[in-house]
Structures are given as structure tokens and as C-alpha cells.
Amino acid sequence: QKEVEQNSGPLSVPEGAIASLNCTYSDRGSQSFFWYRQYSGKSPELIMSIYSNGDKEDGRFTAQLNKASQYVSLLIRDSQPSDSATYLCAVYGNKLVFGAGTILRVKS
Amino acid sequence: EAGVVQSPRYKIIEKKQPVAFWCNPISGHNTLYWYLQNLGQGPELLIRYENEEAVDDSQLPKDRFSAERLKGVDSTLKIQPAELGDSAVYLCASSFGAGTEAFFGQGTRLTVV
């Protein structure tokens, strides 16, 4: 079992729709959770961090954490073509581990 | 505030040659990471420093890779000798402390021919 698992996608959504990206992790003691966006040929860019159960909103982005289910998600509202990228989930237990990423495609 | 700075951006070397990558973290960041990223995969941790101490280097292939972080600021990652399979993007990231938000540099794309 991988430490951090994501569906590789691609996830295709129409412009203006909500994109939902999911991530599960294996270390029950994990404390910090992050979402990064990575455009092709670029380095990962931090977009959200979440540390406690529940929802955290920042503009069009909402991160959701459920430690009991070992599940973290990212919702992108009003998706735009510029949101098309690979989204990486990262989890810190005793080290910062990344998933393989989910490719998101927003079609205009 | 300047971000994480890495150099060089690109490097092409022949196999069996040595190569070194340099990273300057965000000012005040005590934690520094080196990651390797292959195409279509997520970053894989090579080594993590807390100040000048390497606290997690379990994934660093120590027969050919070495790293140092002098005075707890800049860091250098070295490969000697390089192999064809080392072709990848090498990413440096830094954060205030372990478990806090980490920010990446632009990365170094290494091609071994």
C-alpha cells in the first residue's frame, strides 16, 4: 500500500463546474496535509494546507480533512481552464510524502 | 521575499561524470528537503535537513549521492558517478519547521547521456 494514494486521472470537468480531488493516506499519525498544483514543466506550488478535521476555504479552493477515514480532498469551485494542472496531495507524518498526483483538465 | 533558489536549471552530463546541485532556501527556514521527481510521478524524498543536521536520509542512495548543508543555510546535492537512471528533476524545498508549509524552488532538470 502506498503511503499517499491519489487517482491519477485525468479528471475532466467543464468550465464553471466543481472539481473534486481526493487523497487517502496510510499513516494514522499524520498531522499536516497539503495540496500542491504543478503545471507541466514547472515545480509544485503550494495552494492549501490543512491541519485539523473539517473544511478550510481559500477563495475558490476548499480543503476537507477526515482523519478518522484518513482522507483529504480538494474542491475547486468555478473551475477555469487555467486550473488545468496536476494536483499533488502531500502528507506529513514523520516525513513529507507526496502522492503521484491527479491530472485535472478543465474544458472551455 | 525571495523564494527558494536552485541552480543550475538544466544540466546535461555524460554517464559516470559527477554533478552538483545547489539550493538556497527561504530566509529563516530551518527545514530543507531534496526531492527527486520522475515524469508522471510525485516528488520522492531524498533527504531532509533540520538546520545543518540530516534527519532523514533513508532514501538517499549513499553509494553515489551525497549532500551537505553548511551552516544550516545553503545546501548542495552531489551525484558521483551519474548513471542514466539518474535523469530526473531534482527539487529543493524549505519550510520553517518539519510539518509546516514547504515551498519549492524551480528545480534542476538533469539529463544523463
Image: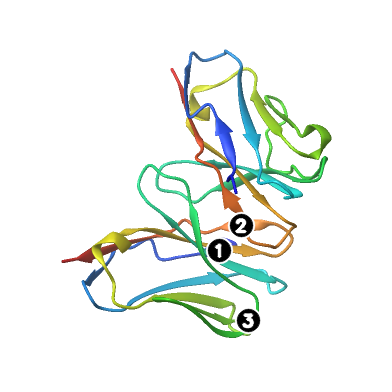
Mark 3 lies on a secondary structure that is loop
From this view, report whether residue B1 is shown above or below residue A7.
Answer: above
Residue at mark 2 to residue at mark 1: CA–CA distance = 7 Å
Q: Position of residue B94 (x, y in %)?
A: 66, 49
Q: Nearer the viewer, residue A99 or B100?
A: B100
Q: Amino acid at mark 3?
A: Lys
Residue hosting label 2: A97
Q: Is residue B28 visible?
A: yes
Residue at mark 3 to residue at mark 2: CA–CA distance = 16 Å
Q: Position of residue B21 (x, y in %)?
A: 60, 27
Q: Position of residue A91 (x, y in %)?
A: 61, 64
From this view, report whether residue B47 is shown above or below residue A51.
Answer: above
Residue hosting label 1: A4
Q: Earlier in the sequence, mark 3 or mark 1?
A: 1
Q: Amino acid at mark 1?
A: Val
Instruction: Say if labels 2 and 1 share a chain.
Output: yes
The circle drawn on residue A67 is: 3
